[in-house]
Amino acid sequence: MRRRLTAALACLALGLARGDTIHTVTDDVIHGTIQRIRGGKVVIDTAFAGTLRIPRDQIKKLEYATDKPLYARLDPENKAKEEVRLSADAEGNPVLIPVADKAKALALGEVATLWPTDGTDPDFPPIKRWAFSLSTGITGNAGNTKDFSISLYADAVRSTESTTLKLYGSLNKTRSDHTLTAEQYIGGLDFEHRPTDVVSWYLRDEAQHNRFSDYFLRNVAAAGYGHYLINASTRGRATKLRLRLGLSHALTVHYTKSHPGSQNRWRESDLAVDLGLLFHHDFEGGLGWNTEITFNPLIDDLSEGTLVHETRLTYTLHELRRFSRRLSDIALEMGMRNEFKTDPDPGYYNTDTSWYVRLSKTW
């Protein structure tokens, strides 16, 4: 009796250790944990070869270790899903039986996506409520000249299906031969509400201090209407192009040298139109492109205003994943920011340009 019980326990333990099973058309047997079926492939985690992606037409039979419930989706562009359980027809072919309608059977070929009910939706993953990133770049030179530059950027983004709130701040500082030659601080917020996939309303505020510009402090607050010309996502890669039109208020605190003989900095308050063009695209392989352009012509003189442009390329270093999953969100950023003023104070240029190369970490 004891010998029979031991044998039964051994068989049970062997079955649990093997987990889910895939039988291929070439009579290979693969044991592991089936994560999902999506895009014509079955993804299974194995102990001997890591994660495998097997074409669906190469699979003859699927076996789950337990009769666990699954979610099935027929159209990957539609969020509708139904709970099913794996079964077999009279010929032994795997079929899916909906829990809500057990008289119906779905063939695997009819299902676009299949995943465990306790797993993450592969087509519409949950939106991360808060996402944080920190970027830093440091460059230096020693010898005939001594230069040292530091660039820091941090942001926090809270997202829901209809709103996005972004808080951000940056620092750019350079010393050449022990003399400070660049010093810029930027901080702000950007809030957007999207009642539809095309229409949005936005509110933004940005403050900037630039020691080597014609003002000590400049704060621009704006609100208005946004319109998405492109808002698409393909296989997790997003492409967005949106226009913004609104009103803004700019408060500028000028340096004393702008008014020779004055002992105090003087303030200037202006109402302006807020025009914006924002573009984002994800390429294959972890490369992303962001371009943001804003222009604020003054209402009382449309020929005078400030245009700010920033373009940033981000490459996520997926190769670091082989060392640690915590390194999989590290990216290399390269970008340029231009600020163009149509009417700068005497002695200053129209355009102030800064560029950067830095590493970023997202969590």
Image (tube, helix red, strand yellow):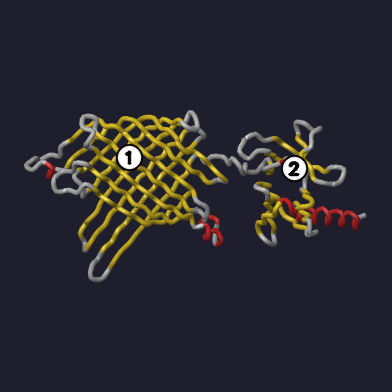
Task: Name the residue: 67% across, 54% down.
Answer: 53
In this image, 221 relative to 112: left or right? left
Task: Name the residue: 62% across, 35% down.
Answer: 79
Between the C-alphas of marks 1 and 2, the distance is 52 Å
What mark, if any, has residue 294 been given in the picture?
Answer: 1
Residue 296 picture quarter: top left
Task: Name the residue: 67% across, 56% down.
Answer: 52
| Image x and y of residue 295, in percent | 30, 38
Q: Quadrant of the N terminus?
A: bottom right
Residue 25 picture quarter: bottom right
Callouts 1 and 2 close, C-beta under 8 Å: no
The amino acid on which the numbered mark 2 sits, given as a three-letter code, is Lys
Element on which disc 2 rests: loop
In this image, 289 relative to 344: left or right? right
| Image x and y of residue 27, in percent | 80, 59
Look at the picture and state if 190 lies above or below 328: above
Look at the picture and state if 142 lies above or below 339: below
What mark, if any, has residue 25 been given in the picture?
Answer: none
Assess disc 1: are there few (<14), some (14-19) or many (≥20) residues with their C-alpha within 10 Å of its C-alpha.
some
Q: Nearer the viewer, residue 238 or 13?
A: 238
In this image, 79 relative to 157: left or right? right
Q: Nearer the viewer, residue 190 or 178?
A: 190
| Image x and y of residue 340, in percent | 25, 45
Mark 1 vs mark 2, foreground winner is 1
Assess disc 2: are there few (<14), some (14-19) or many (≥20) residues with their C-alpha within 10 Å of its C-alpha.
few
Task: Answer with mark 1 or mark 2, whichever residue precedes in sequence.
Answer: 2
The amino acid on which the numbered mark 1 sits, given as a three-letter code, is Thr
Residue 120 picture quarter: top right
Element on which disc 1 rests: strand
The residue indicated by pointer 2 is: 68
